[in-house]
Every structure is written in structure tokens, then in C-alpha cells.
Image (cartoon, coloured by chain):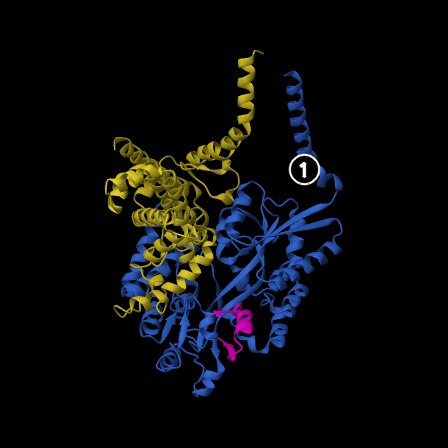
Chain colours: A yellow, B blue
Amino acid sequence: MNKTKENKFYGWFFLSPYLILVVLFFIVPLLFAIYFSFTRYSLIWGGIENAKFVGLNNFKNLLTDKTFLLSLKNTFVFVILSLPIQLIVSFFLAYFLNSHLLKNKGYYKTMFYIPTLISTVAITLIFSYLFQSNGLINIVLSIFHPIEVNWMDSVSLIKYPVVTMYAWIKVGVYMLIYLSGLMGIPTSYYETLKLEGGNFIHELRFIVIPSLRNVTYFITTMILIDSFKLFDIPFIVSKGTGGPLNATLTTVIYIYKSAFSSGRMGYATAASLILFLIIFVIAKLQSTVKERL
Amino acid sequence: MKSFKIYFVMVLVLLSSGILFASGQKEESGEKVLKLVGWSTTPQEKEYVQSRIDLFEAENPNVKVEWEILANEYNETLQIQIASGKGPDVFYLDASWASMFIENYALSPIDYYISQSTIDGFYPSTLDAFRDDSNLYGLAKDMNTLVLYYDELAFEKYGMSVPTTWDELLETSKTFAAMDEYEAGIVLRTDFARFYPFILQNGGSILDEDGNPNWTDKAVVDAFDYYFNDLIGSGAAKTNKDFNGENEGALTTKKVPMMISGGWATAYLNENGKDIEWKMTKLPKGKSEKTVLFTVAYVMNKNANDQELAASFIDFMTSEKSQRMVVDSGLAVPTRQAVADYYIEKNPTLGANPEQAKNAKVYNLGVHTPKIADLMSAAGDKIRLQGMSAQQALEEAELEFNEYLDTL
């Protein structure tokens, strides 16, 4: 065996653990998922040989399934609300932490990051107390106008506590990514701007935002993908129902319920493929837009 | 390079032989392994089940029972285990899920192995959910019915009588709700399982004999009206959502003097209800005295290795002797009629729970139970949160259910 061949062999050999894992836990399940989406199958039927081929029926039924379409609508609402909140809050937290005037940065960094480490169940419980009819949020809002609504039991309002909780958990991670981006901006840029008489707005517009373009793209993609897969918070808040009146029913909760409560694994897999396609198209669009800017 | 290849092949051979050796070990020893999957709500329950398993193993020295406790997502994990091609030999199954497992042929009948006299010893309603037209698939390990809990001190203080009919329940609740001391007369949950007894008591049924939805029937609509408009809508009752999800907690913290829950609530009330004098009684009756019964059975997987052994284990775990131990442990209500008297003797204040079993309908509406429960709960929410009429809410629910059936 010559040197080139030997190098290739070692290359593939050392890659093989990763490749085997990718094939076993990503490629094979994906192929199975595609297969199941064309079948009628319940997990308790046993092995996949029991799945019955139904062609495009699952997809046809899904496109006229009002509950599925509502779950998609809810998911889009959660994405639209979550994206700007998480993006802006994490950016300004990072900007605040990057300030030269700030002391004890480690303390603040830890404080902002801690929600990421707390159990979602505990956070949900705390927020449920905050947003109940006699909770702290209503007490504060009552300073401006008397309010007694139970946010957690309101079809029109429950999305806001969910989005708030979600942002509270997630911004710590994105803040750190933004912070690493901010720390990578050469100080000479700021010094030049100062010499030119630039202010805070100029700093943001001409230095910070353009320098963080790639970081923002990355974080936006992460938030989009993550929000489309939103599951745990609305699931815990609604005790697995997606209620009240399907107001917190995200597509992933719908998929979960179809697969396990209704025993419709084929149908659920078809729904998950549709969700995958939506995320894929949006991520692709986002990348195209970024390249043209 | 050559030595490297030899080394690589040797590692593979060693790994494969290790796996093969490990998988063949138990068969060689001649010991039969029976795998049980269930859940455990308290350390006492875990201890009790383990003690029964130990006794079974002592009586069957060549059998080893492996008990796996699934702490979360029980049904989901179980389904995945079965999908993997094997799953446990015996497992707990809640009545509300039984039809799904039976109709999808995931269970083996047990009546081939269990005597008729044994089967006749159970409250018939506890076994209803675990039957199809020809076979029985499980034996219920314990049960609970929905009952009315109240704070006796509150009733004595204001000289009130405990309600026994719907009218009395409404009047009593309104009276307490009007007092500054209480936020409402009773706390009610809004999930279907909790208001289902009111539909039954009003003579309504969810599915007709052919399995079609029967939801716009007057008896069903009137029951919804009573529960969501007369009780909740009038302020006589508040929902557990008004107390941050707390049902039992609303009673123990004296926010309400009455609540509806199952027999399982006694553990919570014993622990947290020190400031009240809680008592249990039958649900106030409508046109009849019906209530809903919740039960869990030991069932046998269709893939069980030794079905005779699995059936004998189920028989052992639900035997009269075992159920007496359940009573002694104070964990649950026995499902065998012969032990009911013993339960009442040991728990004289909790008699309403087993007494109602005779008039109870098990919580199982067939293979679509989870979907029906979702739609009925949503109908209740439409009345409660959107002010929709019961008739319209139920018409919409029925339409949605029929659309769902069309997609199957």
C-alpha cells in the first residue's frame, strides 16, 4: 500500500466512529421516517414489518386537518414572537456585558446564564405563579389599570407567558455567542470612531452590527430552528394538552400526541416531515437573503 | 499496516463474542426471567410491590422477576419497548389505554390461564375495560372512584348539610361562595374525566351502541350546562386553574370547602389537610348515582416468553391475599369484592369509594379515549372561556370527531 492510500485508509478509519454514529442515528432514522410517513403504523403493532403502506394519504389528510394547521399557525406565532425578543435581548445583554464601564462581569454573566441551567419544569411552575390572576405580573400591571385575568387560562394571552419563559431560558446562550463576537471586534475601530466624534448610534450602526453580521445570522438560524421545534414549555404549561383550546398546541406537541396518544406513528411522521420541510425552506431562504445582502 | 489490520479484526471478534456471550448467559443458567414494567407513586408502594415479588420468587425458585419502574412518560416508553419487538412480559396498563392495546393486538388473553371463579371475584366494572367481545386481557390491581371531599368543620360552623343531589350541590356551593371566607363553594377540574360522572348521572352516554358520538343528546348538553354554566359560570364553583392548578390544595388551604377527586387524594389530604377536618362522601346524584372508576391492571404482553408463568404472576399479584396487603398498606382500594368489607372495616370513613364501584363506569371510551377526552374538554373550555352555548360547543366537538375518524 503506497503512502497516499495508507493516508486515505487512516483518514476514513479515524472518521469511522463519527460516520457510523451519523449513519446509525441520523441517516437510518431519517430513511425510516420517510418510509413511515407513507404508512399506517402504531408502535404497539411491533416491528416495522407491520406498517401498512397508504401512499400519500397521511399527507393529504394532514393538509386538511384543522388541528394540524392550527398547530402550524401557533408555531409560526411563537417563532415570530420569539425571534425578535431573543435576538434583541441577547444582543443588548452581551453589549452591556462587553462595556468597559461594567465591573464584576463574571457575576452578571453567571446571572444571565443561570436560567439556561434551571429545569424547565421549575421555571414553568414559577412563571405560572407569576402570571396567575393574583400573581405578581397582574399586581404590577394593576398600578396602571386594574387587571384580574389568569394569563395561563386565557386563549388569547397564554402565548405571552410561554414566549417570555422561552426567552428567559434561551437568551443566556445567545448572549454568550454575541459576547464572543463583540469581544472579537478590534478596539481600534471604536477608537477611530471616537476620534471622528461618533456616538452610540454610530457605534452600533457602523461597527457593531456590521461586525456581528455572521454571528447574527447564526443566532437567527438557531432561534428559528429551535422555535419551530418548541415543545417542552407549552407541553408543561398545558399539561400535555396544548390548551386552553389548543392555544399552546405547537406542531411538535401535535406530532407527539398523534404518535403516542392516538397511536398514529405514520401520520405523526408525515407531520414531522412537513415541519422539517418548512424549517429547511426557511433556513434556505434566510441563507439566500444573507448572501445577497 | 498488516499487524494493524490483524489487531482491528481481533478487536471486532472479541467485541462480537462478548455480546453473544452476554446475551446467552441467562438461558444457560436455566433460570426463567419475567420482566415487569410499571410505575410507582410512593416509596411505600414500591416497597409493597417488591415484597409481593419477593414472595412470588420464593414460591417459584427458578423464576427471577425483573421489575422496571418507568418514572416518566410511561405509555410512550412502553410503546417504544413494544415497538422494539419484545417489551416486558407483564406491565401495568391504565384502563383508559386498554382498548388501544387490545384492539391493536398488543396483549395476550389471560382467561385461558385464570379460573372463572377468580375472575368472578372482581368488581365487574374493574374488568370491563380489559375485555373485548371474547377475551379478558388483564386483572385490575386497584381502583378508585370519583367522590366528593368536604371540610366537615366548615359545614358544622355554618350549620350546612353535605349535598346529596345536584340541586343541593349548587345551592350549597352558592352559599359558601357568597361568604367572604371562601373564594367559591367547590373547586372543579375541567378535564373530561372529572365531569364525565355528571354526564352519566344525567343519563347521557358518549358513544352510542354502534360507537358513534352521541354528544348533542339532551342529557349530555344538560350535564355540560349544569357543570360549566350553573356551577362554574355562576361563580358557585371555581376551577383548579383559578388556584394555579391546585385541586386538593384549594381544599386544604380553605379556599373552598368542597372538591371532587379520586380516592388517591387521601394521601395528599392526610399530609396537607391538618387544618381541616376532611371527609369523603358519594358524589351528589343526578338522575342516578353513577360515577367514574379509574383502575389499572396487570396485563400480559403478546410477546411474553412464558405466557403461563406471566398469567400465574398476574393472578398472584392480584390475589385476595395480595389485596388484603394493599388494604393494610393503605395505598389503594381493592378490586376484589371479597376484600371490600375488609377495606371498609380498616377505613370506615373512606367507604364511599368502594361503595360507588357498584354504580361506576370505568374510564374507557374505546380506542379513541384520548381524542374524545381532548374534544370534550375543549367543548367545556369553549363554554367556560368563550361563552359558547353547550349545544354549539358539543356540535362543534362532534363534527371535529367525525372529521378525525374520516382521516383514519
Inspect the image, locate mark 1, and give the three-letter code of the amino acid beneath it. Answer: Ser
For residue A198, side relative to residue B364 (left or right) = left
- Using the image, name the chain to which the residue with label 1 belongs: B
First to last magenta residue range: B260-282
Q: Which residue occupies 73% across, 45% down?
A: B31
Secondary structure beneath dot 1 equals helix
Q: Residue furthest front?
A: A195
Q: Quadrant of residue A141?
A: bottom left
| Residue nearest the observer in this picture, B89 or B210 | B89
Q: Is B272 in the magenta? A: yes
- Percent of width and height locating residue B143: 55, 65
Q: Can residue B265 be seen by looking at this rendering? A: yes
Q: Is B95 in the magenta? A: no
| Residue nearest the observer in this picture, B324 or A292 | A292
Q: Which residue is mark 1?
A: B23
Callout 1 crowding tier (Cα within 10 Å): few <14, some 14–19, many ≥20: few
Q: Which residue occupies 44% across, 68% down?
A: B246
Q: Which residue occupies 28% across, 43% down?
A: A204
Q: Is residue B391 above or below residue A27?
A: below
Q: Which residue occupies 42% across, 53% down?
A: A108
For residue B45, side relative to residue B204 (left or right) = right
- Percent of width and height locating residue A5: 54, 14
Q: Is residue B134 above or below residue B261?
A: above
Q: Residue furthest top?
A: A2
Q: Is residue B178 above or below residue A205?
A: below
- Percent of width and height locating residue B158: 43, 87
| Residue nearest the observer in this picture, A168 or B203 | A168
For residue B48, side relative to residue B133 (left or right) = right
- Percent of width and height locating residue A90: 36, 48
Q: Can residue B283 be seen by looking at this rendering? A: no
